[in-house]
Image (spheres, rainbow, N blue to C red):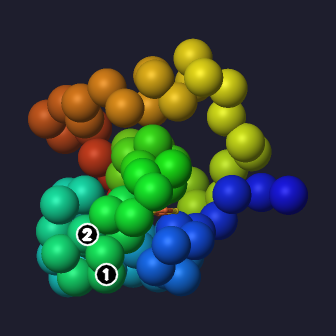
Amino acid sequence: MPVTRCVCHDVTFAELKALCGVVGSDLNALAARTGCGTGCGTCVPYIQLMLRTGQTEFPVLSGAQLRDAMRPIGPGEATARS
Ligand code: FES
């Protein structure tokens, strides 16, 4: 089953991607608007990947992949736009 949402706040990565067009490609801004990432935190690496790649569905990632997803997004690297 693909990972497609922040379960704690019932918001999909597709919805978050669309919201990037309003608040920018910024996890903190998305969290302020939706609460995403502020519950268990499991979705945070996936949201980071969405911001980096524009993808909105992901396989369950390994520990190493999750750690890599959490590296800071560099200037110009964020590609998620609505
Ligand atoms: S799944 Fe997003 S905070 Fe728990």
Say how many tags the image has: 2
**Residue 79 in view in this figure:** yes
Q: Position of residue 56 (x, y in %)?
A: 58, 62
Q: Residue 39, located in which quarter of the rendered image?
A: bottom left
Q: Position of residue 74 (x, y in %)?
A: 19, 31
Q: Secondary structure at mark 1?
A: helix
> Do the CB atoms of the residues marked 1 and 2 lie less than 8 Å apart?
yes
**Front-most of 61 and 42?**
42
Extreme-right residue of the structure: 1
Q: Is residue 49 left or right of residue 65?
A: left
The residue pinned by badge 1 equals 34
Quarter in which the C terminus is drawn = bottom left
Q: Amino acid at mark 2?
A: Ala
User: Residue at 17% across / 60% down in the picture?
Assistant: 28
- Marks 1/2: CA distance? 5 Å
Quarter in which the N terminus is drawn = bottom right
The residue pinned by badge 2 equals 31
With respect to residue 32, does 55 lie above or below?
A: above
User: Residue at 37% across / 32% down in the picture?
Assistant: 70
User: Residue at 64% across / 65% down in the picture?
Assistant: 4
